[in-house]
Image (cartoon, rainbow, N blue to C red):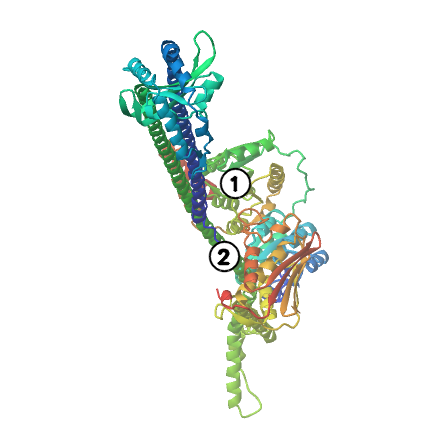
Amino acid sequence: MQFRLVRYFTLASLGMFGLVALSLIYFEHLQGQFFKQTSDEQGTFFSEVQQSFAKQQDESARRDLLSIHEAGNVNLTRLFANALWEKDFAPFVASVQAIDVQTCRAIADITDDKGKKVAPPEKKACFTDVGNRIMALPAFKGLDAKVFDSMKKSTVFKIKVFDLRGITVYSSEHAQIGEDKSANEGWRSAALDGVPKSELTHRGKFSAFEGVVENRDLIGSYLPVLEPGSSRIVGVFEVYSDVTPFLKQIQQTSEQIKLTAVENQRKLEEAATTNQTAVDATSYRQLATIAGLLALLFAALLVIVRRAEKVIQQQEKDRAHAHQQLAQSEKMASLGQMVAGVAHQLNTPLAFSQNNVLMVKDALQSMELPMKVASRLSTILEDVDGDKVTLKVSQLKANLEKLQDGNVDVSMLQAMLADVLEGIEQMTEMVVNLRDFTRLDRAAVANADLNKSLHTVAYIAKTVLPKNIELIEEFAQLPDVECNPSQLNQVFLNLINNAAQAMDGPGKITVRTATDGDRVRIEVQDNGHGIPDDVLPHIFDLYYTTKPTGEGTGLGLPIAKDIITQHGGEIQVSTRIGVGTTFTVLLPVRQQALSALAA
Amino acid sequence: MAKKGGKVLCVDDEPSIVRSLQWLLQKQFEVVTATSGAEAIELVKQHDFDVVISDQRMPMMTGVEVLREVRRLSPRTMRILLTGYSDMQAIVRSVNESEVFRFINKPWNIAELPKVVDQAINIARTQPVEDTAADVTEDAPLVANGERILVIDDDPDMGRAVADIVGTSAKVSYTRNLADAVGILNSEPVSVIVSETRVGSIDATRLVRLMKSKHPEIVTVMLTGESDADTITTLINQGQIYRFVPKPIRSGYLKLVLHSALRKHNALTGDPGLAFRHAVENTASGTVDSLMSDVERAATLSETAIASKGAGFMATLGAGFRRLFGS
């Protein structure tokens, strides 16, 4: 499985940066909201404070106005009472007492639509009648004139006078004379408790001394009238004084304050908005800066990671290349070793064959003359009819030595040539085995008789192995195995060579075959020194070797394992120190996928 | 049939080989064959052989082991090693342990082999045998009487190492230059040459081979970092090198080698006949000339103090070569 560094890094870091950005945005948002909320609350609070301040100011101004006017009215009433009560009002009130009001009061109140008890019209008419009777009194006209005269050009708009029964004895507004105010709270406070009571009211229309006025703010005060020289309440004044200008002033001030408050509020809100905008802007700037930094970080890391991946890829490529080269050199080394062994093996039959052929050739050379002589003799003998032949030996004697030279033991020559034939046979066997081993002229994948393959491998191995190592073949009947025989030969040769290297002196290597279910089992067993515990876990590791640097590539067993794995087989090892090692190869008889082996 | 000219034992695990050798040699010599080392040792114990020819690659016992045993059992027997392909380690051991007379490669030359055997038999029969001295240990002091040892090597440490070992008991001349070596060989009697196979860029083995052919009493010890089987085969056949010491060198081993080399030299000078036991093959013609031209060229190129001596030096060098190796 390939690890895609750049892709994984990009996905992971972008995801992570996204999360960081989201959480940052979230927290910034929370912060902004909190700020907005705080500033809203502040605004509300400030506005409430201002409103309450304005209201208090307004209220206190009105209260002050009321109490100032009440005090003024009290004084006015005193003056008025002192001036008019004793001489004018006291006798007038006394005369009014003669008029009966009980009959009017006896008329029952009715309940109006709103459930409020009001006086029925006949009751009002009754009291109006009482008023008419008062106004009919002879002292009325003079009193009325006096009151009007003294109150003219003052801020007092109306004066009413009540007797202790609560009947309006006098009113500058004549229509109101005779009205019963006994239920009025102001009257009760003044008449029964002696406490003045004032009220600020707005009147759309008001009958003042100098005619009807409109839209006026008035303070009406019920004031007890004390008998001069005593504290006995003898009547109640109701004085209406005009405070419209004052109230207007107060209202203007209030208005002013309200305006200021609104202005302040607006300013505050403006400031809050500005702040909010600033905060938002800062927040955006922060986010943008962090996003920028994150992007920069990502870019830098990406560059580093890409560089790293490139380096890793290059290293991987170099490693693969080096591996390939090593595998090649491993192959060449074992090939070289094999060639050296084969050369030596061929050398022996070559040596004695050459020797024998040359000797036979020399012998034949020396036989030439005797053969000629014999041939000549036979020709002569053919032509002879009788029993005897006479030879002139003088000529022959000179060449006798040469003839004796030709006295070669023919059976020896035959033995020599028999050895040559045997040598040729050995060389042929070698060539056949070499061809079987390499299988260059055969299909890569075949149904092979592994016993035959192993015999070939053993034959080749023997050429390289020291002669004091015995190679024993113990083969059982095997089914043909679907495999790449050339690759398997490489594996078996490697295992046998390893076994040989596990021995210092004489030793024994046994190559064994057996069937194992639907698999075949090939064992290469040696009685060498065994594999130490610290080496055993690494024997199939790439580049692991116990040989000195330059001698072993550490590729033999890993390649063997590769080949066996490609065949769907297994390679196992069992070893005992000082006793020996057995490598076991298990191969399936049939392959699942043949294509993998064709390489 | 006339009495045959010597008793030869041929050893090879391949019966066809020993049969061939027997057929080849039986006309001239009395030939006995063996197909294993053990059998050969038994035969050597029972018979007195002039020559033993053994194959190197045999089961149970290698040729070197067989010949070492033969040397121990019968020092006068000349030993010849037969090899198919050259195994470096085997060759080094054959020099140092078995002191073989010749290497013969398979396939052999059927005209030459009988001559080599004949020569060996002649030496075995006519030349006296040196005493087999008791083995010495590395701790034993070096015995020497002021002999001269010539060290030829690029590495000055080598000269120092030899000087340290011999101390004052022998004289050591060190040079990294073959021209100097020729000068020293001309002016002083040298007993032992310790030489690297290559000095600078020049193959120094030619000097050693030539020296041995003209002055067989000089004992040669070869040092080498690289191992080239052919070089050593040639050295043993043409230079009869006494010992072969692969680098890196253990000083204890070098001391042993020097000790026995000096003893060997004394034996050779004490009885000049012994030297025939180390007779060499003829070196290829022209070796002197090629060596001389190489040395002269190197001397010219190297701009050394020697080279600066000018034309007079060249004349001296040429004269030195002629005196050493004859014309």
Picture coordinates of residue A507 (x, y %)? 67, 57
Residue B123 position within the rendered picture, expressed as x and y whole percent measured from the top left = 60, 52
Q: Which mark is residue B68?
A: none
- The answer to whether A548 is drawn above or below residue A162 in the figure is below
Question: Mark 1 belongs to which subunit?
Answer: B
Residue at far bottom of view? A385
Could you tell me the amino acid type at mark 2? Answer: Met
Q: Quadrant of residue B295?
A: top left
Q: Amino acid at mark 1?
A: Ser
Element carrying mark 2: helix
The answer to whether residue A133 is seen in the rendering is: yes
Dot 1 lies on which element? strand
**Disc 1 versus disc 2: distance between alpha carbons?**
35 Å
Side of A308 where A345 appears, left or right: right
The local crowd at label 2, few if under 14, some if 14 to 19, many if 20 or more residues have their Cα within 10 Å, is few
Nearer-the-camera pick, B26 or A26 = A26
Image mark 2: chain: A
Q: Which mark is residue B195?
A: 1
Report the residue at 51% width, 86% height from top. A380
